[in-house]
Structures are given as structure tokens and as C-alpha cells.
Image (tube, helix red, strand yellow):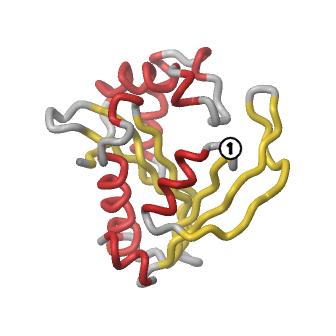
Amino acid sequence: MLRELKESDASLMLECLKDKDVNQYMNIDGSNMTIDDCKNFIRNSLKDSLSKHFAIVDNQDRWVGTISLKNIDSKTKVAEYAIITSKEVHGKGLALEATKEILDYGFNTLNLNRIYLNVVEDNIRANKFYLKCGFEFEGTFRQAIYIKNKIYNLNWYAILKGCEKNEEIH
């Protein structure tokens, strides 16, 4: 389900990033991205000691998303979770399985204590997904991010190692 990113993933990654349904609430402009941008991200991710990025793959080892632990702080044992998946796999359970895997990796391999994320409040589907994964809502930063000519509130979530909800999904 998860594997190291490969440069051969770049074309599918670019297609996903350009999809307006996928990037609607993302703070990037996928329409301006190039294949080289994606290849550079992949190359740089392999050298990035403060982040761990993985490809989410289907049964044919085809890239369908990227899942990450970013801003890893080994002193405070925290990291930021991020995920993007292609529209074709939405609602099929791959993101949930990938999230289980990366939480297990974060808590048991990296020995993290807390994994957090933020998401645009208007992104109802994502907010529901994070709760389903066991993340707990921690609060809203009002008018916190400017995306595509609009200001949005950001909801913050976190999951702690060993908490009851975390144990349910492992």
C-alpha cells in the first residue's frame, strides 16, 4: 500500500495536482505545475530528513496518492500529517488504509507521540475522514488561510500515541 516515491510517479502526481476537485482547498496552484516540479518534489523528498513522504499505490503498484509526515520534531516527538489522493480512489478505503500505515510508522518506527494536521473548515469530506481515522478535533483558527482568492478557517486535529481512538485503527 505504501512505498517510497519514484520519479515514475510524477506524471500521475501531476495529473492529480491539476484536478480542480482534488486541489480545491489546497494552497497550491496545480494548473501552473509541471512534470519537473513533481520530479523535483520526489527527488527532494528522498533527501528530506524532516519529512517522510510515501506513495500510496493500488494493487498494480500504480501511484494513487502521496501521504506524508512533515516537520518531524524528534525532541517533542511530533509531526504533521498530510495526504493527497487521486479522485479515482476517493471513497474506496485506500486513504484510510494508508493513514493506518503511516500512523503506525510514525508512532512505532519514528517513536512519535503526537501527529497533527490542519484542514480547511469548508472541506467537509476531509474533516469527516480525519475523525474517522481517529484524529481528534482541537480547534479552529478563524480566517487563517488564503486560498484561491478566498480566506478560510482552518480546523486543527491531532492523534496521540496510545490513545483509545488510535488503538482502534491499528
Direction from residue 95 to residue 78 in the image, left or right: right
Residue located 33% across and 35% down the image: 89
Between residue 11 and residue 131, name the one nearer to us.
Answer: 131
Direction from residue 72 to residue 133 in the image, left or right: left
Q: Can the viewer see residue 49 in this picture?
A: no
Residue located 50% across and 26% down the image: 17
Residue located 45% across and 51% down the image: 68
Q: Secondary structure at mark 1?
A: loop
Between residue 50 and residue 118, name the one nearer to us.
Answer: 118
Direction from residue 43 to residue 18 in the image, left or right: right
Q: Can the viewer see residue 27 in this picture?
A: yes
Query: Does residue 27 lie above or below 126 as drawn?
Result: above
Kindly identify which residue carries mark 1.
122
Query: Does residue 74 lie above or below 56 as drawn?
Result: below
What is the x, y in percent for residue 140? 75, 61
Query: Does residue 22 lie above or below 130 as drawn?
Result: above
What is the x, y in percent for residue 42? 42, 34
Between residue 73 and residue 47, name the one nearer to us.
Answer: 73
Q: Alpha-carbon neighbours of circle 1 within 10 Å: few (<14), some, or many (≥20)? A: few
Direction from residue 10 to residue 114 in the image, left or right: right
Which amino acid type is shown beneath numbered disc 1? Asp
What is the x, y in percent for residue 101? 31, 60
Residue located 54% across and 64% down the image: 79
Residue that extends furthest to the left in the rendered view of this protein: 60
What is the x, y in percent for residue 53? 41, 47
**Residue 111 image-quadrant placement:** bottom left
On the rendered image, what quadrant is the C terminus found in?
Answer: bottom left
